[in-house]
Amino acid sequence: MKRRVGSIAALATASAALLVLSACSATPDGSAGGGTAGSADLVSLVQTGKKTDVTEVEKALGTPKAKSDVKLCYVTRTLANEFWGYERDGFESEAKKLGVKYQTFAVNDESSITEQLDKAQSALNQGCSAILASPISATALDTVFKAALAKGVPAIVLNDAQGTVPGVVYVGPDAETIGETAADYIAKQLPDGGKVAQIEGDPGSSNALNRGKGFKAGIAKNTDLDLVASQTAKWDTNQAQTIANAMLTANPDIKAFYSQNDGMGLGVQAAIDAKGLTGKVMLVGTDGIPQAKKLISDGTYTATVSERPTTEGETGVKVALWLLDGKTVPAWVDVPAFIVDKQNVAQYQTGMP
């Protein structure tokens, strides 16, 4: 799997340009000169510690171009979760748009780390020009990423499990900010404070850990809020309903729930409804899936911190092609999440941005 990247001279020029333009997190400089890419080459193209908004990156680097022999591979999670379906759709639609060959590898079980690792290794062995993935856990695919980079194959993480392998680019939001945004929103809606509860995702998930960390930090700074319960439902709707029901039984004066994703949030809302507390207990979810937005429109579900999986999938394709073209990219391409509630839900009735 040989890829063309800039010559040493071109890379040096790009590095010098970065020093001059230190305020920028991405630069259109770089060339696709001869040679075979290796781990050191790719790592040098990725700006360690740089976090830049997706719009700024695209403005700096422009529309990427691909050679006819390029094939991009996306190793995703279970497509039974519609969020990952939108992530895949963004990846595949952008690949088609830019005339790039592509293949998606999905797992059957949301928690099957072994299955995902097997899929990622298979993708690498099938001659993929770049590996894009949404790892189930933070380090689950590190061996594949390292092997890919050693062969000159770019590695890009979409949305979850931002890792620490040098040279891997992360495309997605800040999960801690998502959790803190949810806490701040609840605090604003409950100016007199009150008891709140959290439904957590899988404890092995980077997203779950970081959303929880951000939410607790947000609660801590809003001292009138009291987090009385926090428990994992492992991204499962039915488990979330059972747990939320138990929390409401133990603490009938809970005023708000935060669910770390909307799939579990649907279970929480069912528990709230069953207790006759619809409209009395707030629920803030995460992701912005269509079903949650419908319930927001109906006046039951309160709000969701909406992510942008379609945009992330599209951007992942661009990042892969920029790297293959020898261009410099930030280690973190930030695709910020945002609140969707009754005030703006009409703008986002269908699909996911």
Image (cartoon, helix red, strand yellow):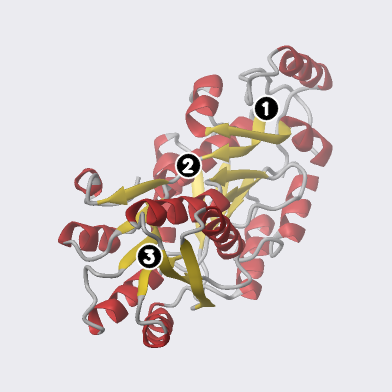
Distance in Å between CA atoms under marks 3 and 2: 17 Å
**Residue 64 % position (x, y):** 52, 27
Q: What number is the disc on residue 262?
A: 3
Rendering coords of residue 292 (x, y %): 29, 62
Q: Amino acid at mark 1?
A: Thr
Q: Amino acid at mark 2?
A: Pro
Pointers 1 and 3 in contact (CB under 8 A)?
no
Q: CA distance from mark 1 to mark 3?
A: 35 Å
**Circle on res. 184:** none
Q: Residue at x 78, y 52 (%)?
A: 146
**Position of residue 62 measured from the top left corner of the image (x, y, whole percent):** 51, 22
Quadrant in the picture for the N terminus: top right
Inspect this view and state whether residue 152 appears: yes
Name which residue type carries label 3: Asp
Q: In this rendering, would 6 be left or right of 259?
A: right
Check residue 328 in the rendering and tell me which mark sits there, or answer none: 1
Q: Relative to the observer, which residue lies in front, 140 or 7? A: 140
In this picture, is 169 found above or below 228?
Answer: above
Whichever of labels 2 and 1 marks the residue nearer the N terminus, that label is 1
Which residue was labeled with disc 2?
336
